[in-house]
Amino acid sequence: MGDYLRYFFFAVYPYIALTIFLLGSLARYDRDQYRWKSDSSQLLKHGTLRWGSNLFHLGIIALFFTHLVGLLTPPAVYHALGLSTAAKQEMAIVVGAILGLVCFAGLVLLIWRRFSEPRLRATSRTSDWLTLIWILIVLTLGLISILTSRQHHDGGVMVALGDWAQHIVTFRGGAAAIIAGVPMIYQAHMVLGMTLFVIFPFTRLVHVWSGFASVAYLGRAWQLVRSR
């Protein structure tokens, strides 16, 4: 990747993505509250919905927070806890692989369910397919990157990724230069991952905000669209 492209994607694009994510979500809530929902398809076909939805949501929510904590925790913090860089990387690989496979299994079930059922396929919007396929690509790249991580036992790549993220959130310069030596598989994963924040406000993903807004969301009973 050229220097100009690297500067755009890793020094400018993160702020563009976050701006669209936040302002787009606010605009969507203000102007389109009647469609601020996940558009449950349980009424059309139950099938593998429970397994697919539970595995997908468990995996993707856990992946989001583990990425957040892993990237934004300075080395000095986990070193003070007695965890070496190599050990932290090994832990990240194991946890990431497990959660990634859980999320992947759920996502494949949801995609197959939507593709194989004619009524679901007929009522699916372009944004639905875009969301599912985009997450699948990002997730697949993340799982593949685990193989690359196994080749860097010193944890240097993990440190570089964390350093980049910390530079971004603290508005420090030089973020793009940090990424220069990071393997391309990580760079692709990061760019496509940031793009999820761009498409977020324009898809059914906005229903995530409703979950965070309610403390009782995680403990609520399964939502029944229609009783038997």
Image (cartoon, grey):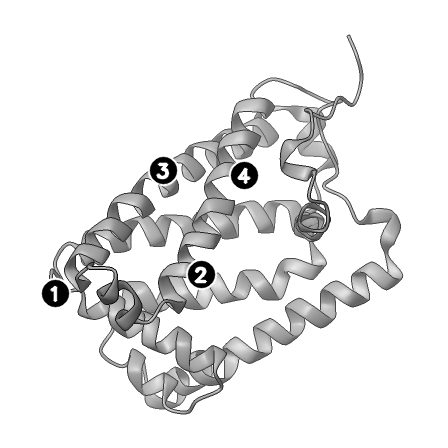
The spot of residue 24 in percent (x, y) is 73, 68
Find the distance from the CA under tag 4 to the CA under tag 3: 12 Å
Judge from the rendering whether residue 91 lies leftward or rightward of residue 38; answer left or right: left
* Residue under numbered circle 2: 68
Distance from label 1 to label 2 (Cα)? 21 Å
Q: Secondary structure at mark 4?
A: helix
Label 2 packing within 10 angstroms: few (<14), some (14-19), many (20+): few
Instruction: Give the residue drawn at x 79%, y 49%.
Output: 36
Residue for badge 4? 57
Secondary structure of the residue carrying tag 1 is loop
* Quadrant (top left/top right/bottom left/bottom right) for the N terminus: bottom left
- Judged from this view, the residue extending furthest toward the top is 228
Mark 1 or mark 2: whose residue is earlier in sequence = 2
State how far apart marks 4 and 1 are (Cα): 32 Å
Q: Are marks 4 and 1 in contact (CB under 8 Å)?
A: no
How far is the residue under mark 4 from the one under mark 2?
Answer: 16 Å
In the rendered image, residue 107, in percent from the top left (x then y), is placed at 49, 37
As helix, strand or loop, the secondary structure at mark 3 comes to: helix
User: Which residue is labeled 3 in the image?
Assistant: 101
Q: Nearer the viewer, residue 94 or 143?
A: 94
